[in-house]
Structure formats: structure tokens, C-alpha cells
Image (cartoon, coloured by chain):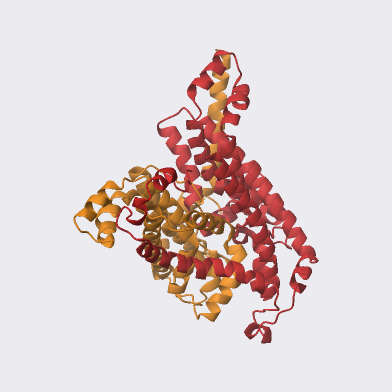
Chain colours: A red, B orange
Amino acid sequence: MALATSPPEAAEAARPDRYSSDAAGLGRLRAGVFVAPALLLVAVFLVFPALWVLYLGLTNYRLTGAAAAAPQFVGPANLIEAVSNPEFWSSTWLTVEFVAGSAVIGQVGLGFTIAWLLRDRRGPLKRLVEGLVILAWILPSAIVSFLWVALLDRDAGTLNALLGIQGFAWLLDHPMLSIIVFNIWRGTAFSMMLYGAALGNVPPSHLESARLAGASGWQQLRDVVFPHIRGHILTNLLLISLWTFNDFTPFLLTAGGPDGKSEVLAVHVYKVALQSGELGHGAAVSTIILLINLVVAVFYLRLLRSKK
Amino acid sequence: MTRFVLGRIGFYTLIAVLLAFFTIPLLWLVTAPFTSNPTYEVTVPDFTWDNFEAVIEHPYALPSLYNSLLLSVGTAVLVVIMAALAAYALSRVRLPGRDALLYALLLLSSIITGTAAMVPLFQLAVELNLIDSQLGLILILTGGLLPAAIFMLKDFMDSTPKSYEESARVFGATPLQIVRHVVVPLVRPGLATIAVWAVANVWGNFLMPYLLLSDVEKQPAAVITYTLYTEGGQANLSMLSTFGLLYSVPVVLMYLFVSKKYGFRFHGGIKR
């Protein structure tokens, strides 16, 4: 995870003559030409939408009718409507549950546990466990969410058969729990790989001396391992929280239902904007999401910079 | 000694539980396609190929896989070319404001998601006449993946030596020739990683094609799968499971190939 900016900054500055006649004779002008196509696409399809959503949230833009062709500026009306909508607050709360349950507790906890269990192992068992966890992560979300629809089915689902119970409708009676467990299943691979790499960097000699000093397994974890990988834990927490916060996959499992009981914010935006057709209102909710993303991302980047 | 034995028992119990947790949901996908008239129940298959025939005859199933291929390969090609050129220039030339630019790119790529940009991207597609345009979708997906790709590739290029390029220049090679014949071979593993990452990302992407492609003949497999299981309330399970398997196999093969060739070390801002 070495997202370095540029390593030999000092060396380059010390030799200003290489500045103008750079490695491949790539003058600044030509470098600009190399960078331009990428920047153009990013500007049109990423930066512009992010800025434009701020404006659209202040209009009465709709999917159909007169306001579809010529949306009018209405000021903060949508924002006020959004935050006075009880569904917005229930969605926010469900999103907090989703992030806390599946990302913070689930993926960090399970990802670390698997990495720790397999830390000193090589061979088929390690490959099997890791392969399966990664498989859950790389399979298309439309497929794996349907696999869980089958697994959790009330009448013929494998889970009820295994538990020996009948007629328990997981997706209808416990939609959030289903989605949280599903997301732990689907998303743990990233944390597992990150902690696997991080544990490989803990100096074995530190663990060895702790063991010789009579530290128990838990003490070794608490006093040697956790302090050493604290940066990784924080990075991991921020990244997967951000991803989970923006994850639209719950829509594929429950479509937000029943009765909005699993309508996380990502699904809420879709429902308000594209199903109800109130695009301006949806854009206002997106603005809030964008601001929350910004705060988390800034924390993440500060963390990356401070680690260097 | 007892402690050791208990430890071993605990270890294997935990591993068994983990294996069960990660395997059981997948069982249906590998049994139902080979079963006549599958239900949600996991049963021992009777190894019929009828379901595969039904998928082949389905008017949208195979074309949607082709659409997925088109979208993901198209996006990957654009991402690799543009990111390689940009990362190379940013790695080798000190453009004014370069560090700020990279920082801004990384920030943007992590905060602007489908959820945040759903409405403006939809409007943009409407205004530019890109609804139901696969090329338009490819451009939108490329724009979303480029910042992270540039970041990862620049890191990669920073760690390759500059001396080869310098000697190529002494022999009169133009910058584009140098990129093609000197830089590309050096950073090939990095380019391959980015390409695979982009393909995997687009192959599984649901939200953007679902929003922007309403013509069923242009929709990729992710959208077709979803419409197959929501349409009419009663899902056609033999079709769905078989199609799901066909849709899953390419990413599994790709993963096996990548992990064999490069070792599977995907970190950084990767996924989704």
C-alpha cells in the first residue's frame, strides 16, 4: 500500500539541469500532452458530476414533466425537504448499522482473525481458505447477492435446512442482519489480504522475545502486534467504511425493503432520485453523502501522508 | 501438552467454521446448473446439460455476456493507455503542481462514487445523448477508474530505472517510441495488473449500466441477471443458476491466471 507521491524529490531538486531535459527528453509540453487525455476524461466524467450535483441539489430537477427539460433554481428547499424526511433519517441510521456491523466489526475482525490464524502457514490449507474468501470478493455482485437470496429462502433455503428450522424468512424478518452478514462474507477478502501483508512485517524477533518473556497469545497480540500494525488497522477501517457507506449492493438483495427496513443511503438516493423521479431531492441527499465521503477521505489521506 | 492439543482442536474448528461460512453460499451455484428443475434447495445434481442449452437459446443471455466483455475490455484498454501515458509523464517530468494534482486525484477517486454522482451522471448522459450508448458508458467508467490507475502506475514507474530511456534517447528514439519499446516492457506487470483490475471492476459493475442502459440488447450480464430474477416474481432458477455460473467463470479464471503469474497482491484503493 505504498501510495508514495515521489521518492527522490530532494535528488531531483539538487540537479536542476535534469529538470528541463528529463529522462526521455519528455519536455513539459509533451508531458502535458501525455497527461491531458486522462485529465480530460476525469474532468468530464468525475469532477464535473461532483460539482454539478451541488447545483442540481438546489434545483427542482425531475425525471418527467416540465422540470425535466428546464430545472429551476429553488435554493436549499431540497436539502430542507431531505433532512425533514423521516425516511432519510431511518436510512442514515441503517447505514450506520451497516457500516458498523459489516465493515468495522465484521470485516476488520474477521479479516484479521483469518490473517492471524494463517500467519505462519504455507501450503494447501492456506491457499484453500484464502482462495474461497477471495472468490466471494471477486464474483459479480449480481450473482453472489442472488446466491444469498437462495441461501436465505424461507422454504427451500440451505440455511434453514442446516439449522433445522422451517419457514424463517431471513430477508423479510431480518433484512439488515442478512445484509450485514452478506457484506461480511463478500468484503472480508480485502481486510484479510491487508492484514496478511501487515503481519508479515511484524519483526519475528519481537514476537519471539515476547514469547520467551512468557507473554500469552493475547498479550503478544496486544503489546507487540497491535501497536505495530495500528496504521494498517486505521487505513483499513477508513477505506472499507467508505466503500460500505457507498455500497449499492443491498439493493440487489432486498431492494431496500420490506418497508424501507434495509434502505441504506445508497439505496435511498436511488429510490428518491430515479424511482420517485425527484432528481433534485436525490441530488441534495447525494450532496450530504459527498460531504461525508470527503471528511473520511481527508482523514485517510492525512494518515497516508503521516505514515511516510 | 494438553494446551497444545486444545490449541490444535480450536484452530481446526475455527478453520472448519470459516470454510463452511465461505463455501455454503456457493454450493447452489455449482449444483443447480447441472440439475433438472432446480429449486433453491441444494441437491446432488443429476448432471443434465439441458440448462446450458436453454441459456444458449435465450435471446439475451449470451449477448449480455458479450456486452459485458465489450464494456470491460473497452474500459480496460482506455484505462491502461491513458493511465500509462499520464503516469509516465507524471513520474518523469516535474510539472508544476504535480503533487497537488496527484493528491487531488486520489481524493476525488475515493469520494466520488456512484451513489454521490448518480444524478449528475444520469443528467450528463441525457444531455450528451449517451443513454443507451455503450461507448458513453465506457467513457464514464474510464473516468471513474483513471485516478486510482494513474496513482498505482505512477508508483510502479517511479521504481523503474531511467537509464534505459536515456540511452534510447541518445540513439535518437522519439518519446512515443521510448514509451512503446522501453517503458512498456519494463512496466508490463504493472500494466497487466491495472488491466485485470479494470476488467474485474467493470465485469461486476451493476449500478452504472443499470442506470444508463435501458435497451435490453445492450445490457451487460449483471443487469440481465437482476432482471431475470425480479421479473414476474417467479424466477427461472435453471436459467439463473446456469447463466450465473457462465457469468462467474471468466473472473475465476482471470483470478487463477493472475495469482499464478503475479501472485495475488491487490491492495491500495482497489475494489468497487
Looking at the image, is A67 positioned above or below residue A204? below
Q: Is residue A291 left or right of residue B44?
A: right
Outermost left residue: B171
Q: Is residue B33 above or below residue A9?
A: below
Residue B79: % across, % down: 41, 61
- Residue A193 seen in the current view: yes
Q: Quadrant of residue A288?
A: bottom right
Q: Which residue is at a point 70% across and 68% down the rendered structure image?
A: A284
Residue B181 in picture, x, y percent from top left: 24, 56
Please tell me whether residue B225 is drawn above or below residue A173 in the rendered image: below
Q: Quadrant of the N terminus of chain B?
A: top right
Q: Residue at position x 33%, y 54% from top? A: A22
Considering only vertical position in the picture, is B188 above or below A107? Answer: below
- Residue B253 lies, in percent from the top left, at 37, 51
Quarter holding residue A38: bottom left
Foreground residue among B122 and A182: B122
User: Where, by quadrant of the figure, is residue A173 drawn?
Assistant: bottom right
